[in-house]
Amino acid sequence: MENANIATNLTTITRSFANPDCLLVAVSKTKPISAIQEAYAAGIRDFGENKVQEMTEKEALLPKDIRWHMIGHLQRNKVKYIASFVHLIHSVDSLRLLKQINKEGQKVNRAIPCLLQVHIASEESKFGWDEAELTAFLFGTEIEELQHIQILGLMGMATNTPDTEKIRAEFRGLKALFEQIKRAELPTQVQMKELSMGMSGDYRIAQEEGSTMVRIGSAVFGARTYT
Ligand SMILES: *Cc1c(COP(=O)(O)O)cnc(C)c1O
């Protein structure tokens, strides 16, 4: 299949950014190597995938200066396949997963960069920590044992709804939590630097509400036939 006009899409998207300093992570899940090469030629170096096998296959074939972002629900038994190279795991949705990432980080002698995914949507199906769970963990003692992870911020997905005010309120709530945590005294392996929120349909709202990274798939590469 022909790739959509990826370079043109990228220009249109970045021109429409509400915050030009926001990082665009191009979500290439389900898309062929040729599509990633096209975005790469247009200057993109950050790519997001949601499946471990797909990410490792693409990583092996593509330039080594690509920064690979894991954005989908990650199974604990698969962390080992990406531990050595993943640039940032956005979708750390439980303490059990974080402990596994720490274990694999230790094996490859790195502190793996992570974001904690917070549940902000009204859909039950979306993964993530709730606020109470998150603060209990960050200000608790269990984190002291995790020296092979780095927590660089938070990630959230808004409800899939046409109600833009609801989306905005959810992003605003996440930003407020981010700022509240940032003001506190934090363990050494925690820094509140990155706030990953916004996708093709809501990235402008997310940027207006303080996003530092947007994860954009279909607006860059065209619609997916499956997710
Ligand atoms: C697929 C996906 C995206 C990108 O979605 P688009 O609507 O195609 O931009 C962003 N974030 C996550 C977690 C995803 O799974």
Image (tube, rainbow, N blue to C red):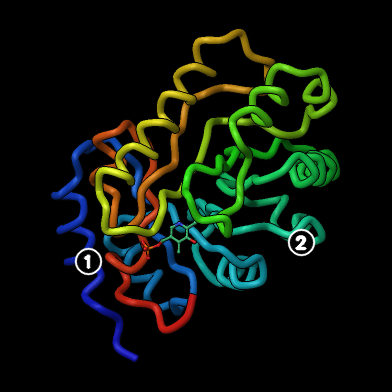
Q: Residue 2, how many percent across, how many down?
A: 29, 88
Within the image, what quadrant is residue 64 found in? bottom right
79 relative position to 176: left or right: right
Check disc 2 and report the residue beneath it: 78
188 relative position to 196: left or right: right
Residue drawn at the location 76% of the way across and 61% of the way down: 78
Mark nearer the viewer, 1 or 2: 2
Residue drawn at the location 42% of the way across and 62% of the way down: 27
Check the image and report above or below for 124 versus 33.
above
Check disc 1 and report the residue beneath it: 7
Within the image, what quadrant is residue 112 found in? top right
Q: Nearer the viewer, residue 64 or 106?
A: 106
For this orientation, the residue located farthest to the bottom is 1
Q: Residue 24, how many percent across, how many down?
A: 34, 49
Residue drawn at the location 30% of the way across and 33% of the way down: 209
Classify mark 2: helix, strand or loop.
Answer: helix
Check the image and report above or below for 72 versus 56.
above
Disc 2 residue lies near ligand 1 with CB under 8 A: no
Q: Quadrant of the N terminus?
A: bottom left
Q: Which of disc 2 and disc 1 is earlier in sequence?
A: 1
Instruction: Give residue 180's mark.
Output: none
165 relative position to 116: left or right: left
Determine crowd level at label 1: few under 14, some 14-19, many 20+ residues with C-alpha closer than 10 A: some
Q: Amino acid at mark 1?
A: Ala
Can residue 211 be seen from the camera position used here? yes
Residue drawn at the location 59% of the way across and 30% of the way down: 131
Q: Nearer the viewer, residue 127 or 26?
A: 127
Count every numbered label the image shows and give the total.
2
